[in-house]
Amino acid sequence: MNKPSAEPLLSVSGLAKHFPVAGGVIFARRLGCVRAVDGISFSLARGETLALVGESGCGKSTTARLVLRLLPPTAGCIRFAGADITSLSGEPLRALRRRMQIVFQDPFASLDPHMTVAEILEEPLTVHRIGDRASRQARVALLLGMVGLSRYHAQRYPHEFSGGQRQRIGIARALAPGPELIVCDEPVSALDVSIQAQVINLLGELKETLDLSYLFIAHDLAVVKHVADRVAVMYLGRIVEMAPKDVLFSNPRHPYTRTLLAAIPRPDPSLESSPPARGELPSPLAPPPGCHFHPRCPFAIARCRTEDPPLATLAADHLAACHRATELAPAVLPGRKTGLAPNAARRLSLTAALSRPS
Amino acid sequence: MTALLSIEGLRTVFRQHTGDVAAVDGVDLSLDRGETLGVVGESGCGKSVLSLSIMRLVPPPGRITAGRIRFDGTDLLGLSAPAMRAMRGNRIAMIFQEPMTSLNPVFTVGRQIAEAMRAHDSSLGARTLRSRAIAALGRVRIPAPERRFEEYPHQLSGGMRQRVMIAMALACQPDLLIADEPTTALDVTVQAEILALLDEWQREAGMAIILITHDLGIVAEVADRVAVMYAGRIVEEAPTAALFDDPQHPYTLGLLGSIPRLDQAPGRLVAIEGAVPPPFALPAGCRFHPRCVFATSACAAREPPLAALSPGHLVACIHAPVEQSLVPAAGDRTDE
């Protein structure tokens, strides 16, 4: 998956985005600066899914927009397929956009209500001057099939579709120019549970058949566990822990990762709920000194209040930014072994057996 | 013990140009003092209209056309508008999903809490109101309540706003709190705190809670009993442990299969195919049958009643338990 010899599809180093905050009624004053993304580095191999996880305001969506060059970075370097794309512009940037696409969170806001589905799916092809009219129309039909919609849906408008179907249209649009990288920005969090499952399954199938790589932005760790190969946890603009999925979920080293894992409500009433985390995300305008997480951290010591911990390598592929990362006891995560009740599991496997393979 | 709240045959319809469309269609429920009932379902299942019906706050063109809602011996549907207004907030309170739209942006949060308190007791003076409102903010664990009292909603985070809503809802110590997706708009760590807060209040005050949610995880954590709704009807109702240990209705199974779990190796999720039918185009017979893998021709013929499979465990499915009916009925499956 992460062979050192193979060049990563995407690699980001020291990426930062600072937004100035201005105030004042007559004369603009600069009040400060929000470090939405504060020097992060990661890479994504071909065929891999890297999840960026964190709560609102942690900078995960800003990172997505920086990677796609939709926002200019304040500092850092973005490489895509071996080439530096940090300051690309004009025609080369346009050509690059063919190769990286995005699926948005809100399928209601991200489709133009005045366009038919066929027009929505054809637009990226026209923009990138792909094919002639006939081949574009054939591609639209093909795309609809790929995402599980029918040919007759092409002439309909977005309002005629349910949320799940709209998200399928959004995915088809992202697939249209034949990208290698798709940034999925919370693609299922606006959907109902049963629809979420359909879209998660669809994204998994498409990744296999089209050999895609995903940068998957999410706040739901259970979804992430399902789709990701590797996970990066963000807090106030920084990556605080990054590891292969199995390692992160079985042996989280950063206290914030543990807090997130413990906070997820589990569909199992036999479990005691764990005591909630203390406090809320501090203001990004004035992050606390030292480790940004220390005011909420149950393991904080004096050093955490003054000294900012670097993102250090604990084991191959496992990085954490915590002074105490190596000394913390193994995480006790409630109910990691329980799974479904026997009756529920038996009936669910019956359901699965009877479901038509899509 | 008589139930605190009992609902029988509730039907709430919305008038459309094509005729009445029922969002809640024949719902029976009861709730004891101090109990937490989770109402689970997806968008459009009628769970929010159900809660608004209990408050008698269904927006026009919606109206309640049938059924009874008894609350602590009083028939809520028979109350006059002023009597119902006195009931709301005082004895039955409600919190909503989006705390920003529930708060008025141009008044301080302190003033809004005080206003709610004065509405129920006009004899309170300004100073008493202020100290009570500050105490209420402190009880929902808002740090520096004196300072927050003077602040406007936009100065608070989402979690703080929801705390303000809870402080307001609980100010009059209601017997019943209806919480409609109270944590859906919040981050997971904040959600855990809000749920812990509700739990603590409930234990102290013996308040009953109806928790409307789409998240089975939340239900497992806080509810005593669960009602699963689909297309305006309850399809399964059981004590929480029974629902998770012995889920019966294919829709409940579908919901359980759809959620990615931390305690399970990732694989393909057992998704429910298709989407919830709109209330003006409900299928004949069982409302879930077009999406159900166990459906037979009998399912399309008649709507199954909500019947007790074991004491306290109600299911509206003629095939429950599915593994037993599956074998003889296998040849009968509709190939839809």
Image (tube, coloured by chain):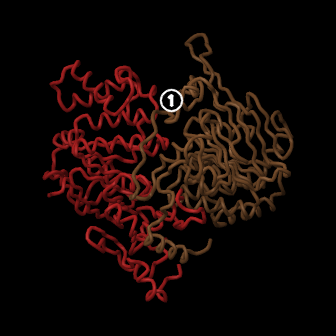
Q: Amino acid at mark 1?
A: Pro
Q: Residue placed at 55% from the left, 60% from the top?
A: A197
**Is disc 1 surrounded by few (<14), some (14 to 19) or many (20+) residues within 10 Å?**
some
Chain depicted in red:
B
Q: Is residue B89 left or right of residue B17?
A: left
**In what quadrant of the picture does the N terminus of chain B appear?**
bottom left
Q: Residue at x 58, y 59 (%)?
A: A165
Query: Height in image: A267 above or below B313?
Result: above
Task: Please name whichever residue, B140 or A209, is drawn nearer the observer in this view of the structure.
Answer: B140
Residue A100 in view in this figure: yes
The residue wearing badge 1 is A295
Residue A174 placed where, x, y %? 71, 52
Rendering coords of residue A104 (x, y %): 63, 47
- Identify the element where label 1 is drawn: helix
In this rendering, position of residue B83 left or right of residue B50: left
Q: How many marks?
A: 1
Instruction: Say which chain tag 1 marks.
Output: A
Residue B295 % position (x, y): 45, 78
Residue B6 picture location, percent across and down: 21, 57
